[in-house]
Image (cartoon, grey):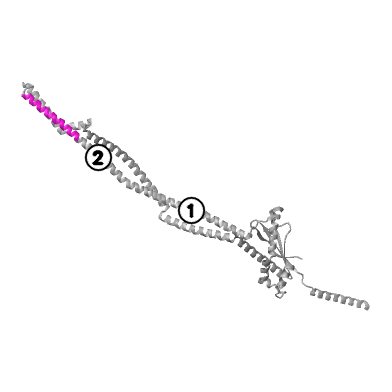
């Protein structure tokens, strides 16, 4: 029984010794390395377009040279130099274990810590950083990605910067031109308000139509009056004063001719009385009366001719007055018509200037939109680094061993 107890005690001691030895060995073993991974996506399109999601193997094959090129860029000296020179990396436990030996840091980073390789049959690049702590692995991978993208974007900026500067200058010049033309439009609208302009054009047009109609009417009257006046002048040169039937009636009804007609009639009555008294027609009494009658008839004929001539001269004077009146009326119309025409032409020029300014502004607005679109395109191209778009497909995370 004692032997059994002793054996149990020994067994327990051996077990305790094994536990102690095991704990000591575990404490002496180095920590297992930790790896952080992330993926980048490479495409030939705009950011956000995933060739591996919706394109065939032929598209992936066409991207492979670009994928390998970016892998080389990730592992290139400028990117690694910027990474290892950053404060975040220098503060990691991994970096500080080399006691400032930069060559050793670089060799270890390239051989054991950093890795970049294409993911087969995709347009993805897998990046990894391996360190003794999760914190160091994540710091190294995140900083590596940031440094790479800075270099990547600088590469694109250098490629497209000149074009962007040119389009930016063009854009600013167009903006300046738009400001100038908008100032001219404001000044134009101040001097020529559109609503008032339309009313003035309408009023001037209506008045001009009225004056032109009156001018046409008076021109016709002047033409008729001038023709009648010219005809009367021609008759006057020919001595043709023959009155019309109406004029002849008026002359015959005049007091002078009525008086002469009365005297002729009285003389004829005296002749009849002399003949009735027995005087011979060839006698001195009747012959004297006949002489008086002939004299009175000559006076009447002369009076009629004088009155016909006076009436004709009056008609000529009236004709000349009518021509003068019509000419004077036309003369008063002309300045106003010319003024209205000049006014309407001025309004029309102002309208044409406004339309030209408005069209120029629309053209400049189109140029501004085009320049702005070009700038946006160049900004996208700057991110694409020479036709290649690289985006973060999955953020850095710790992967299980």
Q: Is residue 203 magenta?
A: no
- Which image quarter is the C terminus in? bottom right
| Nearer-the-camera pick, 90 or 279 | 90
| Nearer-the-camera pick, 155 or 209 | 155
* Residue at numbered disc 2: 320
Q: Earlier in the sequence, mark 1 or mark 2?
A: 2
**Secondary structure state at the residue bearing disc 1:** helix
- Which image quarter is the N terminus in? bottom right
Q: Residue at x 43, y 51 (%)?
A: 351
Residue 253 in view (yes/no): no
Residue 359 as seen in the image, left or right of residue 385? left
Q: Is residue 295 magenta?
A: yes
Q: CA distance from mark 1 to mark 2?
A: 59 Å
Question: Which mark is drawn over residue 360?
Answer: 1
Q: Point out residue 362 in the picture as x, y percentages from the top left corner.
A: 50, 53
Q: Magenta residues? A: 284-309
Q: Residue at x 54, y 55 (%)?
A: 369
Residue 251 in view (yes/no): yes
């Amino acid at each position: 029984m004692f032997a059994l107890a002793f054996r149990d005690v020994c067994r327990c001691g051996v077990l305790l010794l094994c536990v102690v030895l095991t704990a000591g060995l575990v404490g002496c073993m180095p920590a297992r390395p930790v790896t952080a991974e992330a993926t980048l996506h490479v495409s030939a399109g705009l950011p956000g377009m995933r060739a591996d999601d919706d394109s065939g193997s032929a598209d992936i094959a066409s991207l492979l040279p670009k994928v390998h090129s970016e892998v080389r860029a990730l592992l290139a000296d400028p990117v690694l130099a910027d990474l290892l020179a950053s404060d975040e990396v220098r503060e990691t436990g991994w970096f500080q274990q080399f006691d400032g030996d930069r060559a050793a840091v670089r060799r270890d980073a390239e051989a054991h810590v950093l890795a970049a390789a294409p993911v087969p049959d995709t347009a993805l690049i897998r990046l990894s950083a391996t360190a003794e702590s999760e914190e160091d692995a994540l710091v190294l991978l995140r900083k590596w990605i940031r440094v790479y993208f800075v270099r990547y974007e600088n590469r694109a900026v250098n490629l497209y910067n000149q074009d962007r500067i040119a389009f930016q200058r063009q854009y600013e010049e167009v903006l300046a031109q738009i400001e100038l033309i908008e100032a001219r439009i404001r000044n134009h609208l101040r001097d020529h308000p559109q609503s008032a302009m339309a009313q003035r054009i309408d009023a001037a047009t209506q008045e001009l139509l009225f004056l032109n109609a009156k001018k046409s009417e008076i021109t016709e009257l002047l033409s008729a009056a001038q023709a009648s006046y010219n005809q009367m002048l021609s008759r006057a040169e020919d001595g043709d004063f023959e009155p019309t039937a109406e004029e002849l009636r008026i002359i015959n009804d005049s007091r002078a001719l009525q008086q002469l007609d009365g005297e002729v009639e009285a003389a004829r009555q005296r002749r009849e009385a002399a003949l009735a008294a027995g005087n011979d027609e060839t006698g001195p009494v009747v012959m004297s009366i006949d002489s008086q009658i002939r004299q009175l008839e000559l006076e009447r004929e002369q009076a009629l001719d004088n009155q016909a001539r006076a009436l004709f001269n009056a008609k000529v004077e009236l004709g000349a007055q009518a021509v003068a009146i019509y000419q004077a009326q036309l003369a008063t119309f002309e300045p106003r018509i010319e003024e209205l025409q000049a006014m309407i032409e001025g309004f029309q020029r102002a309208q044409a200037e406004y339309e030209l300014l408005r069209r120029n502004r629309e053209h400049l607005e189109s140029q501004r939109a085009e320049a702005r679109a070009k700038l946006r395109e160049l900004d996208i191209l700057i991110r694409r680094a020479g036709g290649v778009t690289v985006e973060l497909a999955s953020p850095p995370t710790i992967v299980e061993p």
